[in-house]
Image (tube, rainbow, N blue to C red):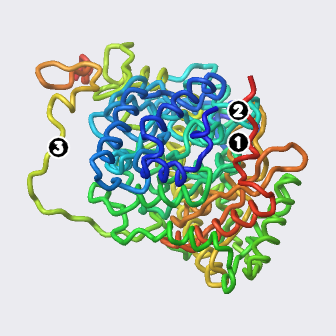
Amino acid sequence: MSPESSSAGGAITRDEVAHLARLSRLAVTDAELDVFAGQLDVILGAVARVGEVAAEDIPPTSHAVPLENVFRPDELRPGLTQEQALSGAPAAEDGRFRVPQILGEEQ
Amino acid sequence: MSELTRLTAAELAQKIHSREVSAVEAAQAHLDRIAAVDERVHAFLHVGAEAALASAALVDESLDADTPPASPLAGVPLALKDVLTTTDMPTTVGSRILEGWRPPYDATVTAKLRAAGVTILGKTNMDEFAMGSSTEYSAYGPTHNPWNLDRIPGGSGGGSAAALAAFEAPLAIGTDTGGSIRQPAAMTGTVGVKPTYGGVSRYGLVACASSLDQAGPCARTVLDAALLHEVIAGHDPLDSTSIDAPVPAVVEAARRGAEGDLHGLRVGVVRELTGEGYQAGVQENFDAALRELEKLGAEVVEVSAPHFQYGLAAYYLILPSEVSSNLARFDAMRYGLRVDKGASAEEVMAATREAGFGPEVKRRIILGTYALSSGYYDAYYGQAQKVRTLISRDFAAAFEQADVLVSPTAPTTAFPIGDKVDDPLAMYLNDLATIPTNLAGTTAMSVPSGVAAEDGLPTGLQIMAPALGEAVMYRVGAAYEAARDAADGSPFATRIPEVKR
């Protein structure tokens, strides 16, 4: 990132926020970008405090309760009907979800 | 206001089960109350009057046939947070992206409530996807605190807490990812419990952060919360993180606690969660609560949890990371909103998510995407997970020295609506004292600890216990509640002012 595009806090730039929004499939407006960039910079500055903790040898916790893989017998159980599964779909056709074009012209 | 709406759930259940009052009368009294005040409070996003009366009528029929009540709460009305799926009512999670969505299945909590004969009145307002501490981030407008309509009711479960304080329901369900049950309880002078992670099924709970989310009971008394706790808790094969162990005997513990003897129990004051940064009235009421606990025979000791000060930072890395992953499912293809803008699926997805999500949800998705991106992962998400380990170790060490830990639930009383809505970091600070419990997967509750002298608004005492340590927590909560009521000369709920016109 160029020095011009970095914000006051320096943790994250407006361009980076725009890139992250694209990755997150959020078509954010320019006005939102202006606001979010400043706010995220402040938030990142605060959460960066985790770096102050000496934790090299500490194992990470992803889940508070120790978990083992949970199995169940491979038996048929009642589930949603096709009609129920499609009941909330924005568009459905012939018992399937109808979606917009997925591949571009050149693909 | 009908007298029926002033009763506790336990009292109302007794009247219904002894046939003094019908379940339909109880439901109607609360529906009338909602009709009278909810325009001003806005606790509910949806009221299912017809279904509520039909459910209550079934309870009456069953009692008329001399069948024993399906549960100790059969026929008692309840307000359900709009984050749990319901086949007969919309489930919006406070978001435009799920506006009008009718889920094809009931959450396990919903199913358990129905099986217990509890009357579900409707769905309550919340911060969008449970992200917020004031209910102002709901896409459907804020909920107002019944104590003072210009104040926030806390969040994200502000609707459930406000429904209790406005006497629109004696029971409610909340969910707590970083304090969303306990902080609203403190803001509204009600009781809220975050059960041990895995204690209540998450099946049908629309996910915010899966390793932190937990549904729990909300009520105006500790005993009522305990009665509801036993209805909704328990192992569920549909949630693979659900704990396969007996539900702690919390009703018995609450009844024992109300007898008022805490001799032999050690109460630990967490040094890092008191003092500086707490409003004067919050700290005064906390100190007074400690004196009550001592009078009840408890030994009050000071404990240290040195890593709690990093809890907020770790939480706001772990939570957004999980959010950015969980909310990827809102892709405009299978359910929910679709904005047909652009030719490709990707463009439709981006336009839909832009239109369907509010600012706080977008901020957290972007923040999580950042924390998980290569090059930053170790410094942010990875480091936060290590801090999470250290916080669990702090709890383990503290519980060696004390049976329960206590702190104020929130640093301030309810702040004015609009005060922090544009300052996300200031909003996050409300959850300073509640977050460590979620990170460690332990249990905690908030019990009213009086009103702050300077503003007349309620404050909460947080009581924390080890995983599956709910029984000792309820015992201490009920003992404190009984002592506080005895000192005041009346139950705390009688101090809630009538909703202003």
Q: Is residue A38 visible?
A: yes
Q: Amino acid at mark 3?
A: Gly
Q: Residue at x 42, y 35 (%)?
A: B24
Q: CA distance from mark 2 to mark 1?
A: 7 Å
Q: Amino acid at mark 2?
A: Val
The residue nearer to you, when weighing B338 against A87, is: A87
Q: Amino acid at mark 1?
A: Met
Q: Chain under label 2?
A: B
Q: Position of residue A90 (x, y in %)?
A: 29, 20
Q: Residue furthest bottom?
A: B264
Name the residue carrying label 3: A79
Q: Secondary structure at mark 3?
A: loop
Q: Position of residue A76 (x, y in %)?
A: 9, 52
Residue B309 picture quarter: bottom right
Q: CA distance from mark 3 to mark 1?
A: 41 Å
Q: Position of residue B293 (x, y in %)?
A: 75, 73
Name the residue carrying label 2: B421
Q: CA distance from mark 3 to mark 2?
A: 42 Å
Q: Left or right: where does residue B168 sit relative to residue A44?
A: left
Mark 3 surroundings within 10 Å by alpha-carbon count, few (fewer than 14), some (14 through 19), many (20 or more): few
What number is the disc on residue B427? 1
The residue nearer to you, when weighing B287 against B50, is: B50
Q: Secondary structure at mark 1?
A: helix
